[in-house]
Structures are given as C-alpha cells and as structure tokens.
Amino acid sequence: MANILTPVPSLKLNDGNSIPMLAYGTGTAWFKKSPTAKADESLISTIKTAISMGWRHLDGAETYNTEPELGTAIKDGGVPRSELFVTTKIWKGFDDIAGSLKTSLEKLQLDYVDLYLIHSPFKMEKDEELQSAWRQMEALKKQGLAKSIGVSNYLPRHLEATLKVATIPPAINQIEFHPYLQRAKLIEYHKQHHIATAAYGPLTPVTKGAPGPVDEYLEGVAKKYAVSPSEVLLRWYIDQDVVPVTTSGKEQRISDYLRATTFKLTPKEVGMIGQLGEKKHFRGFFTQVFDDNDRT
C-alpha cells in the first residue's frame, strides 16, 4: 500500500472555513435500506482504516442510514474531533430541519457537523419551500450546530431562489460531476456566486460509465505519474478546485486514492480530459428527474 505523507489540500469556502479536498463517502455501496438495520461492522472498520491512513473529510447523510457507523468510527478512530471534517445531509422533513440535524448529531455522537447540506431540492416544488428550508439552515449555523451550510443536487433555479433570501449564501453544492457530466452552466453559476463544488460519482468514467472516450488518455497520464486512472481522475477534480467524494471497501484502494495528493496535472492534461469527456454523456444518479440528453 501507498505510504502517503502528503496532506490533503484544503479549499477555503465563502464563509471562511476550509474543507479538505478529498472526501471518504459512506453512501453508495454502504447504503442501508433501513435505519433500524443492525450496525455494519465492516463499514465501521473501513472508516477507521481510512482515518488511520490520513482521510479527514468524512461524508455521510441521513438517507444512507450509516450515520451510527460513522459516529462509532469517529469515536474510536484515534484522531481528535477537531482534526476531522464531517459532512451530513438532510433528505426529508424540511419543516423541522433542526430536529433532523439533532437526530443526526445523536447518531453521529457529535456536538456539531462541519458541513450540513440539503440533500436534494426535488422534494420542494415551490420557491417558498426552498427559501423556508434555507432560513432554517442559517439558524443552525448561527447556533453552531453546523460550521458551514450548503446544498446538494441544486440547479441554478434552486440556487437563485435560495439566494434571494439568503443572508448566508450556500458554501457548497455537492453534485454529480465527472468528465461525462460536466454541467458547464451550473459550474459557471457556482463561480459567479462563490459557491464551491463537490463532486459525487467522481470515478464514474472508470466504473459504470466505462468504456468511454477518456479511457486511453487516462491510461497514458496514469503511466506518466505512476498512478492509476482513478487517481488521475481524483486529481482532475482537485486541480479544478472541486472536492471529490469517493469510497471503497478495499483497503488498498483507500490507501491508493490518497496518491492523488502527490502529483499535479498540467493545465493541458486537465483540459484534454474535459475535452474528451464531452464526447460522451452519462448520468448515473437522479435519472428519473432529467431527460436522457439533459446535461444540466
């Protein structure tokens, strides 16, 4: 396994807080169908392994039903809470977001989270619902229950409605983003309003989006830096100030992914991966919300 001593770089958010630019996710393959299902001991062990290897940004969510495992791993992980960056998200119950966060904090065995996100806007049909939800999020930040607040899966129209009433703008929008779904208009909106971007599904081009037009180029770049195509992809995000959220149950990969912090792509390489990626369109999440050819 890689013995990575290079610290994960951080990105400064619009509220002055900093976020580690490589996150270990506890959803996807770890997702549990029921909140009452017994604890997944393998997930607890894997998160503790990730922490011991140097991962500091841990990404959870109410709907993953894995907050108890994340909390146990944090408690037993051997690293001070102050050195960790913990994200969780609210999925439903937008009439009482404070109650949802307090429930999450109990499961996580924490007094606060570093980042709290509204997981999806698609359950809120009216601008007034988005705005009410955001006012509640701002109150939680002011109370210190969440150091930073943000959103996930928001489109420009959702952000625009939110910003109309925001006294504290969203710090970040976590979205599906990868070479086969580059969402240029949304990313540009983020930049215009100083909203950071986090990317879930960052390894899609080498997993369920494969094969595709970036394959050969990724292989060549990976050979140049003596890393894997997955690590090249993770660096592609970091070099664009995007925070990738990835996961694995395999100790070797958890270690190897940290090698994305040990090299830097050239601007030409970043551009070429993006250019090749535009030749294919693939969306892996929320496919029921978007038309097949919708790249927003």
Image (spheres, rainbow, N blue to C red):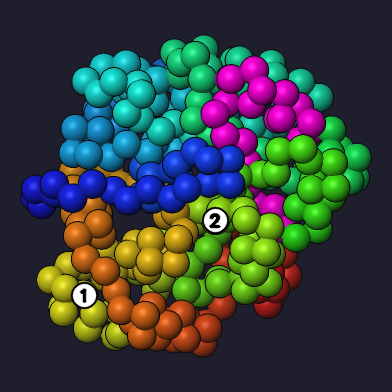
- Upstream in sequence: badge 2 or badge 1: 2
Q: Can residue 214 be seen at all in this image of the molecule?
A: no
- Pointers 2 and 1 in contact (CB under 8 A)? no
Vertical position of residue 98 compared to residue 221: above or below = above
> In this orientation, which residue lies closer to the viewer: 91 or 2?
2
Q: Position of residue 289 (x, y in %)?
A: 73, 58
| Picture quadrant where residue 156 is located | bottom right
Say left or right for 69 vs 228: right
Q: Which residues are magenta?
A: 133-155
Say left or right for 172 vs 2: right
- For the residue labelled by badge 1, is the local secondary structure a helix, a strand or a loop? helix
- Nearest to viewer (mark 2 / mark 1): 2
Vertical position of residue 210 compared to residue 120: above or below = below
Q: Which mark is residue 222?
A: 1
Please give the residue where the numbered disc 2 appears in the rendered image: 197
Q: Position of residue 200 (x, y in %)?
A: 49, 54
- For the residue labelled by badge 2, is the local secondary structure a helix, a strand or a loop? strand
The amino acid on which the numbered mark 2 sits, given as a three-letter code, is Thr
Residue at x 24%, y 79% (from the top left corner): 221
Q: Is residue 150 magenta?
A: yes
Q: Position of residue 215 (x, y in %)?
A: 33, 81
Say left or right for 229 vs 113: left
| Label 2 Cα neighbours within 10 Å, binned few <14 / some 14-19 / many ≥20 | many
| Label 1 Cα neighbours within 10 Å, binned few <14 / some 14-19 / many ≥20 | some
Q: Position of residue 206 (x, y in %)?
A: 35, 69
The amino acid on which the numbered mark 1 sits, given as a three-letter code, is Ala
Residue at x 43%, y 50% (from the top left corner): 11
Q: Can residue 231 be seen at all in this image of the molecule?
A: yes
Q: CA distance from mark 2 to mark 1?
A: 24 Å
Residue at x 68%, y 57% (from the top left corner): 193
